[in-house]
Image (cartoon, rainbow, N blue to C red):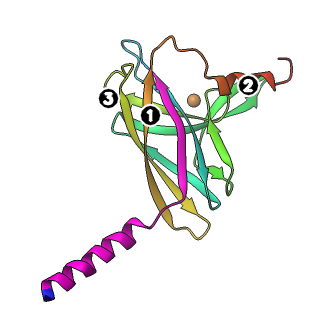
Amino acid sequence: MRSLITFAASMLFTASVMAADPGVSVDEAWLRATMPGQDSGSMQFSVTSRKAAKLVAISTPAAGAVEIHSMVHEDGKMKMRAVESLALPAGKQVSLRSSGNHVMLLNLKHPLKAGDSVPFTLTVQYADNSKATVEAKAEVRPMGAGHDMKGMDDMKGMPGM
Ligand SMILES: [Cu+2]
């Protein structure tokens, strides 16, 4: 009987640990297949945090390093610059796309082939400085894959388009 109670208690404990939901969802994650010799790639996804948070790190076993880049206008040119973190306002979907803020995989460890699935981990930090990690997967799409429809819609809203 005693062992049964211990077992039940440990089940409860497991359940409460698993209930620690970071409240972060990742959608539409994908990246493009790489060409021979290409050692970097960009990954696209959208992320929504229920509570206000910052995206502070991204990692994947497929790459030596992952950087968050933003586009800045400098000397009449658009340049990309690595940023330390990206704000995730409460309940708002934040998109990381090739046209704006985006994520780059550097020092790829192997070529990305269409149909593969690449696991990655996001680390978010909340206002109270606590952190949570979120696991997600990105689908590798063929090299020639066109822009996704969401991206096209974004383009239409741009001045001069
Ligand atoms: Cu970049």
User: Rounded to the nearest whole Å, what is the CA distance between mark 1 and mark 2?
Assistant: 22 Å
Q: Quadrant of ligand 1?
A: top right
User: Rounded to the nearest whole Å, what is the CA distance between mark 2 and mark 3?
Assistant: 33 Å
Q: Secondary structure at mark 2?
A: helix
Q: Secondary structure at mark 1?
A: strand
Image point (58%, 45%), residue name: 47
Q: Residues within 10 Å of mark 2 (few under 14, many from 20)?
A: few
Task: Tell me where residue 65 appears, x and y as whole percent.
Answer: 42, 38
Image point (65%, 44%), residue name: 94
Residue 96 vs residue 132: left or right?
right
Magenta segment: does it hold 16? yes
- Disc 1 marks a residue whose amino acid type is Ala
In front here: 24 or 122? Answer: 24
Q: Residues within 10 Å of mark 1 (few under 14, many from 20)?
A: many
Q: Residue 36's image quarter?
A: top left
Image point (27%, 81%), residue name: 9
**Residue 113 versus residue 2 in the image, above or below:** above
In which quadrant is the N terminus drawn? bottom left
Tag nearer the camera, 2 or 3:
2
In which quadrant is the C terminus drawn? top right
- Which residue lies under the disc numbered 3? 109
- Which residue lies under the disc numbered 2? 153
**Residue farthest toward the right in the current orientation of the protein:** 160
Query: What span is in magenta?
Result: 3-32
Q: Earlier in the sequence, mark 1 or mark 2?
A: 1
- Disc 2 marks a residue whose amino acid type is Asp
